[in-house]
Image (cartoon, grey):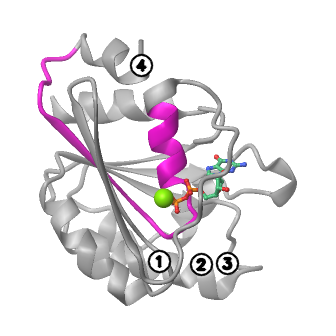
Amino acid sequence: MSILSSLSKHFNKDDVTLTLIGPPNSGKTTLIKYLSTSKPVEEDNLPTMGVQIRREAMKIDKWTISTIDTGGQYNFMQMFWETAIEQATCIIFVIDATIRKETDEELFNRTLEQIDYSFNLIPEVVPILIALNKQDLTEANPMTIKEILELFPKKHLIDRTISFKETSAKYGHGIKDSILWLLESME
Ligand SMILES: Nc1nc2c(ncn2[C@@H]2O[C@H](COP(=O)(O)OP(=O)(O)O)[C@@H](O)[C@H]2O)c(=O)[nH]1
Ligand SMILES: [Mg+2]
């Protein structure tokens, strides 16, 4: 039984559309794979190349899970998020927590830009979970919730249902809790 069906049966939710957004390489596809198998995702996915768009919408139990992957150009990618966000009943924004402001300032700032861009599109009633992913890469010193809260734009925390979780999409750490929080928030 998948995590989604084991948790969903305690809730009256038939029509959940979870949209996964976040920078390329943050772990969105890996998270979908973990949700469908509940097993560690060992194999590496094929990276999305160029400006190719790969729209993935899949059904897992009663859930529709969608994410739009685009390689390369950030602005181009953002255009396609709008549709995915419109359809969402809940959202996970996946961040690669090993990308730190001190060491990867440019990439870190791009993540913040994408948070800005997408939060302006997400209705206040839609719960958002920020997954601080890749926590298993301890040697890369992934950001903690406390650290991201210091850098996260305060304006996006007001009037929203939002939560931060430390996750590993690859091994499943924090994933069940994340789904549970989303289900409780949609009730
Ligand atoms: N160690 C580790 N690697 C991860 C994790 N999540 C994703 N990855 C790896 O990061 C790379 C990009 O992941 P992917 O899911 O394709 O990212 P996407 O572009 O957001 O869909 C792949 O090599 C994954 O195996 C994680 O939680 N831990
Ligand atoms: Mg992907």
Q: State the residue position of label 4.
A: 2
Q: Between disc 4 and disc 3, whose residue precedes?
A: 4
Ligand 1: quadrant of the figure: bottom right
The magenta-colored residue range is 11-35
Label drawn at residue 112 = 1
Q: Are marks 2 and 3 in contact (CB under 8 Å)?
A: yes
| 110 over 69 or under it: above or below | below
Q: State the residue position of label 3.
A: 101
Q: Between disc 3 and disc 1, whose residue precedes?
A: 3
- Type of amino acid under label 2: Phe
Image coords of residue 41 (percent x, y): 63, 37
> Cα distance, mark 4 to mark 2?
33 Å
Image coords of residue 71 (percent x, y): 48, 76
Q: Would residue 176 be visible to someone looking at this image? A: no
Q: Are marks 2 and 1 in contact (CB under 8 Å)?
A: yes
Q: Are marks 3 and 1 in contact (CB under 8 Å)?
A: no
> Cα distance, mark 4 to mark 3?
35 Å
Crowd around label 3: few <14 · some 14–19 · many ≥20 (10 Å)? some
Of the two numbered discs 4 and 3 in the rendering, the one whose residue sits closer to the viewer? 4
